[in-house]
């Protein structure tokens, strides 16, 4: 059972790196630092397990999405966590801010960010999505 859970955790890391989600990595790092601070020496086995699994996840990601596609001369895999630009997300955020300015009190309505931007269904930022679709009052 323990081996299955470790494999599942490694697979989760591989998928996380493929998704290029940097927010989850930041949250994970904050959680690990908080765990180390609060539990001190009692957290060492847990932190060691996490570090081993993330290292194996990085190696597996690199093998599955970098080495093997390069060996097969495949260009299927293009998204990485280390991408150099966030221009696309900044553009999506700017569109969300425009919607907030246009409808600051009631918002544009649930799932209407996608209506105003048919190529991208959400701004990749939950706060901006909530504010643009519902309103700014919850914030």
Image (cartoon, grey):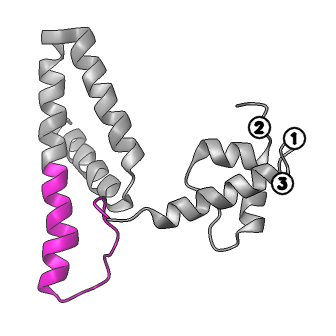
Residue 73 screen position, x and y as percent: 18, 89
- What residue is shown with label 1? 105
Q: Residue beneath label 3, please?
A: 102
37 or 10, which is in the foreground? Answer: 37
Give the mark toward the camera: 3 or 2.
3
Q: Residue furthest bottom?
A: 73
* Image location of residue 126, percent across then percent down: 60, 45
- Whether the magenta-drawn stretch holds residue 66 is answered as yes
Element marked by disc 1: loop
- Left or right of 41: which side holds 136? right
Residue on which the image places disc 2:
136
Q: Nearer the viewer, residue 99 or 54?
A: 99
23 and 136: which is toward the camera: 136
Contact (Cβ within 8 Å) of mark 3 with mark 2? no
In magenta stretch: residue 44 = no
Look at the numbered discs 2 and 1 and tell me whether their residues touch, using CB distance below 8 Å. yes
* Residue drawn at x 70%, y 69% as measured from the top left: 117
The span picked out in magenta is: 56-83
Q: In the figure, 126 relative to 41: above or below?
A: below
Q: Give the structural element (helix, strand or loop) at label 2.
A: loop
Residue 116 point in image, percent of width and height: 76, 67
- Report the front residue among 3 and 105: 105
């Amino acid at each position: 059972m323990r081996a299955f859970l470790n494999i599942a955790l490694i697979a989760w890391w591989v998928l996380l790196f493929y998704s290029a989600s940097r927010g989850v990595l930041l949250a994970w790092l904050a959680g690990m630092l908080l765990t180390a601070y609060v539990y001190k020496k009692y957290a060492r086995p847990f932190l060691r397990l996490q570090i081993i699994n993330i290292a194996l996840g990085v190696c597996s990601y690199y093998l599955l999405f970098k080495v093997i596609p390069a060996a097969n001369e495949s260009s299927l895999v293009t998204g990485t966590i280390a991408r150099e630009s966030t221009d696309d997300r900044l553009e999506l955020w700017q569109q969300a801010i425009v919607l907030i300015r246009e409808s600051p009190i009631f918002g544009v309505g649930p799932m209407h960010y996608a209506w105003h931007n048919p190529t991208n269904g959400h701004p990749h930022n939950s706060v901006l999505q909530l504010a643009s679709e519902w309103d700014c009052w919850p914030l």
